[in-house]
Amino acid sequence: MKKIISILIAGFVTSALYAQNPDSISIDDYYVDFAVPDITAFSILDINSNDVVRPGNIKELAVGIQNYIDAEGNLKPGLAIEIAPYRILAKALKVRSAWEQNKSLKNLQISIGTAQGDSSNLLAAWGINWTPIDRTDPVASRRLQNFFANYLANRDSIANQLSFAGQRNKHLRDVNLFLNTLSTPAGPLPAATRVAILQYFGGGYRTRLLRYDSTDNQLYTMALEDTVLRKMSTLSITINNSQAQTLSTLVAQNAKLTFTELKEEKEFEKSFSEALKREKKIFVEENWNRLVIQFKAGSKYNSAENSIKDLALLNWRLFGGIAGRIPGLGNSNSTFAKRSQVIYQASYINYKDSSMPLKWEFSTGGRLLLGKADKRLSAEFLYSQASLRGETLEKSEYIRYTIGGEMKIDEGLWLELAVGGQKFLEGNDNTRVVPQFGLKYAIQKKSRF
Amino acid sequence: MELVQFNKNGGPVSIDIDIEDTNVWSYIYVSDLTFTNKSSTGNPSQHTLGLPVNLDDDINSWDIRLGNIGTNNVTVTVTITWKQDGQVLNVWTRQVNVPAGAATKISDDALLDATN
């Protein structure tokens, strides 16, 4: 597969070199408005996503913010918090079930961040991402969730075989019966004393293996028996030879149960992950063109005095997009319905920073896709209008169009090939950023509907 | 290993099993009876273990399986609450990290003990 992709890329590069105007730039300029923009505080400020903190409750959120914004409103660089209001409010208000019914709120994320500017100034940003509907998301699919809940449950309902919990329960009952035959000088073992010894035989197999620091059946047996005998000694419990023999038998049973469970659970965990990959792939193939609605907004600020009081707005941005099957084909089983998708997007950026050549830019357009989740043909049309900064009140107004195809190489990585161009309706044609017409290619890591 | 003490003259002992922050789970709780449940049923996770006369010196065991079909690691909170006559007898809580695209199991046991 890699070889085929390499040959394809080489072919595209060669053909593009001959076809392109030397001044032309990459196909990103065609597609940039059709990739879903990453509008988070972190992408706006170039913060590494590994540094992002995701608080699970209001207390964690307050502590996270307090470290970077003090009571006087002074700011420090390094704040990178992403909040899922659904989780935080649901826990705080104890209304989890009510919130769970409103699935659209689950996919709302708010991000805030601060970073050091080029000099002593500080940059700050916020972003809101809301996907009220996403029927292409396998993780949100109730069918897939139920499939894997059943997958888990089936592991513990094997016909004609006790579950591991059942086997452990039977074993612990045997150990408890044995403990009930023992005594101390004060009399029979009370419940708390029996629990103190039963704990060595119970719990999860992982806990038991960690407790005895053993990966070997024989070492495990020796360590468990030694631990139990020492505990009995501290509790003033004495046992005779017959009782010692029974204890050895119980310890051997425990070792067998532990190592059988270890082996089978490892296999089960592996099979779960494999089944998940398989089912997700099937889901995406079947649902890649289902309804998605997405809204995003974000803003960037500068503070010369590192204070919340002198934050100056640099720019703000809005994005909205809707993708899905062609209207009227939502429930159709036809090949065309399954293999087509329409996308409509709109984006607005307002630049307050006087060093920027534009005051604002609005773009809107659509795509028609034909194909499958990972390879498809596309036709696109974009209209854009912008206001230029300067003494004149000049506007720029143009359309862009492409016809081509795209193939998914890896998660989030697409190979694109298209022909297209740009035509000015108003404004100076010299400001054209892509050729009037040309063949273009690109391999880009962009989020797609 | 938990010690759950209950009044031998009281009413039935019951359990509530609560699993937060994952949509994919199943459990098996083994006592004299065996209770199973999974996230796909949507049923409440409350079970009656039985009357005190049948529960003294009983061993209970449970395996709770947690799945994460998402692309980020999640921390799941699992709680079992034993109750009798509206009073909480004992609470068992664990926070479990479930890696992205993986399943894990958490297990434990309890000894039930009747008191006056």
Image: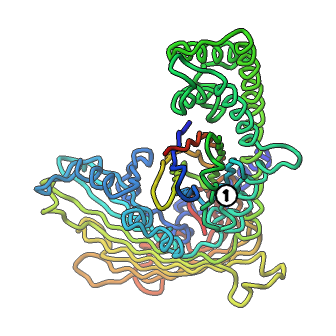
- Amino acid type indicated by mark 1: Leu
Residue sitting nearer the eye, A397 or A412: A412
Counting every numbered tag in the picture gives 1
Please state if A424 lies on the left or on the right of A172 as rendered. Answer: left
* Residue at 55% over, 71% down: A34
Q: How is the image coloured?
A: rainbow
Pointer 1 chain:
A
* Residue at 56% over, 62% down: A447
Question: Would residue A261 be seen by someone viewing this image from the given angle?
Answer: yes
Check the picture and name the quadrant holding the C terminus of chain A: bottom right
Please state if B114 lies on the left or on the right of A156 as rendered. Answer: left
On screen, B11 above or below A129?
above
Question: Which residue corresponds to mark 1?
Answer: A415
Could you classify mark 1 by the number of other residues whose Cα lies within 10 Å: few (under 14), some (14-19), or many (20 or more)? Answer: many
On screen, A255 above or below A146?
above
Residue B16 lies, in percent from the top left, at 56, 58
Residue A94 lies, in percent from the top left, at 41, 66
Residue sitting nearer the eye, A368 or A155: A155
Please state if B88 lies on the left or on the right of A125 as rendered. Answer: right
Residue A199 lies, in percent from the top left, at 58, 30
* Residue at 61% over, 29% down: A198
On screen, A32 above or below A410?
below
- Can you tell which quarter of the image residue A262 is in? top right
* Residue at 50% over, 81% down: A364
Question: Would residue B76 be seen by someone viewing this image from the given angle?
Answer: no
